[in-house]
Image (spheres, rainbow, N blue to C red):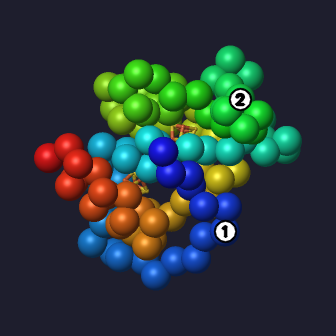
């Protein structure tokens, strides 16, 4: 599984909207940093011993609200999630990868 990049730059595609997306960025690996205030039961260690957001069997972060496909811990979400910009290169790429794989 690929990770949300720590350093993001953005050429924003204004045609992209989270409201028309299956929150595919929430399928990426999110590293939890020491300063993050994420509920601990949502965090696990990966095979490299790094703390990451846990994922469910469906492939999405366990913090996703499955009915609304949005973050259920929005105010406590990790810093990496805060930096992930709608319409950015990474957003557009992940949407394309997901579309090719699942639709
Ligand atoms: S940031 Fe991009 S990938 Fe994430 S929910 Fe919004 S449109 Fe989808
Ligand atoms: S913490 Fe929230 S925004 Fe971040 S990946 Fe999980 S559901 Fe998505």
Q: Is residue 31 left or right of residue 99?
A: right
**Residue at the spot 61% in from the left edge and 44% down from the top edge:** 30
**Residue at the spot 45% in from the left edge and 71% down from the top edge:** 88
Residue 80 image position (x, y, % from top left): 65, 53
Q: Quadrant of ligand 1?
A: bottom left
Label ID, residue 102? none
The reply to whether residue 35 is visible in this rendering is: yes
**Residue at the spot 36% in from the left edge and 26% down from the top edge:** 58
Q: Quadrant of residue 49?
A: top right
Give the number of marks: 2
Neighbor class of circle 1 (other Cα within 10 Å; few <14, some 14-19, many 20+) is few
- Could you say whether the residue bearing mark 2 is in a helix, strand or loop? strand
Which residue in the protein does label 1 denote? 7
Residue 85 image position (x, y, % from top left): 51, 64
Residue furthest to the top: 41
Q: Is residue 1 left or right of residue 17?
A: right
Which residue in the protein does label 2 denote? 45
Of labels 2 and 1, earlier in sequence is 1
Neighbor class of circle 2 (other Cα within 10 Å; few <14, some 14-19, many 20+) is few
Q: Is residue 101 left or right of residue 57?
A: left
State whether residue 98 is above or below residue 37: below
Residue furthest to the right: 34
| Gap between marks 2 and 1 measured at Cα | 21 Å
**Residue at the spot 27% in from the left edge and 72% down from the top edge:** 15
**Which is closer to the viewer, label 2 or label 1?**
2
Residue 56 image position (x, y, % from top left): 46, 23
């Amino acid at each position: 599984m690929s990770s949300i990049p720590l350093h993001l730059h953005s050429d924003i595609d204004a045609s992209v909207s989270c409201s028309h997306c299956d929150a595919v960025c929430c399928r990426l690996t999110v590293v939890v940093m020491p300063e993050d205030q994420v509920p601990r039961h949502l965090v696990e260690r990966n095979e490299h011993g790094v703390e990451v957001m846990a994922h469910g069997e469906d492939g999405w972060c366990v913090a996703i609200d499955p009915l609304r496909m949005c973050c259920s811990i929005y105010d406590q979400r990790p810093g990496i999630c805060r930096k992930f910009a709608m319409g950015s290169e990474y957003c557009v790429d992940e949407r394309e990868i997901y579309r090719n794989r699942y639709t």
